Amino acid sequence: MFTFSDMKGALVFFAVLLSVLSDVIPEERGFSSGLGCGNKYVNCEQYCEVCEAYPPRTECYATLFKETCYSHFVGGMESLNNTDWCNWNNVKRMYNTFTMCTEEIAECLLIPWPNRMVENEFVNIHSRFFRDCPNEALSDPPPSIVFALVMTPICLIPIMVVLVVLKTKNGDGSS
């Protein structure tokens, strides 16, 4: 028996299939939607058509996000050895594609980006794939450096006060 989530997946698959098979440029057909649709990207019309048949838009966005962006990213990451996940050169293309995909769908559906769902998914991705990567966290400098940086302005303040007093004792105030 089919569940509601199976139906969502089928709708997303159908929308992606339509976008691949369609050879008409979206700007040529004109798109009218009561909710509006962004037209900045090529696939906007297909995304909006799917979401008109599958309201509300936020749930549709979540489904398109999972099926179109997230599944491709996870598949690509899982195709790599987990030791390669920490090498930015190995993952930057997939990461950028994933980011652009989430932004494209959100802009097409006129949903703010980034949003809470996207932020949560990025946190989940980082905790799943990048949690064991060494990070170059900033640490405090040695105490001698901290002491020098703190004491320099403290010592300059009395010197500046003495200079101001000497200048004003001169009487003319100019020199």
Image (cartoon, rainbow, N blue to C red):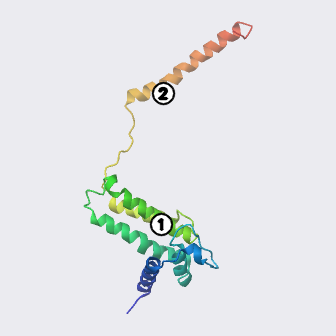
The x and y percentages for residue 165 are 66, 12
Name the residue at the top extreme.
Answer: 170
The residue mark sitting in front, 1 or 2, is: 1
The alpha-carbon separation of the residues under discs 1 and 2 comes to 46 Å
Residue wearing tag 1: 102
Residue 125: tell me if it is visible. Answer: yes
SS at circle 1: helix
Q: Quadrant of the N terminus?
A: bottom left
Q: Are marks 1 and 2 in contact (CB under 8 Å)?
A: no
Pick whichever, 72 or 122, lies toward us.
72
Name the residue at the right extreme.
Answer: 172
Q: Find residue 37 and name its label.
A: none
SS at circle 2: helix
The x and y percentages for residue 95 are 39, 60
Quarter location, residue 12: bottom left
Residue wearing tag 2: 150
Whether 36 is drawn above or below 4: the answer is above
Label 1 amino acid? Thr
The x and y percentages for residue 76 are 32, 66
Pick whichever, 169 or 7, lies toward us.
7
Label 2 amino acid? Val
Pick whichever, 141 or 122, lies toward us.
122
Q: Name the residue rendered at 32%, 69% in the picture.
A: 75
Q: Name the residue rendered at 53%, 23% in the picture.
A: 154
Quarter location, residue 173: top right
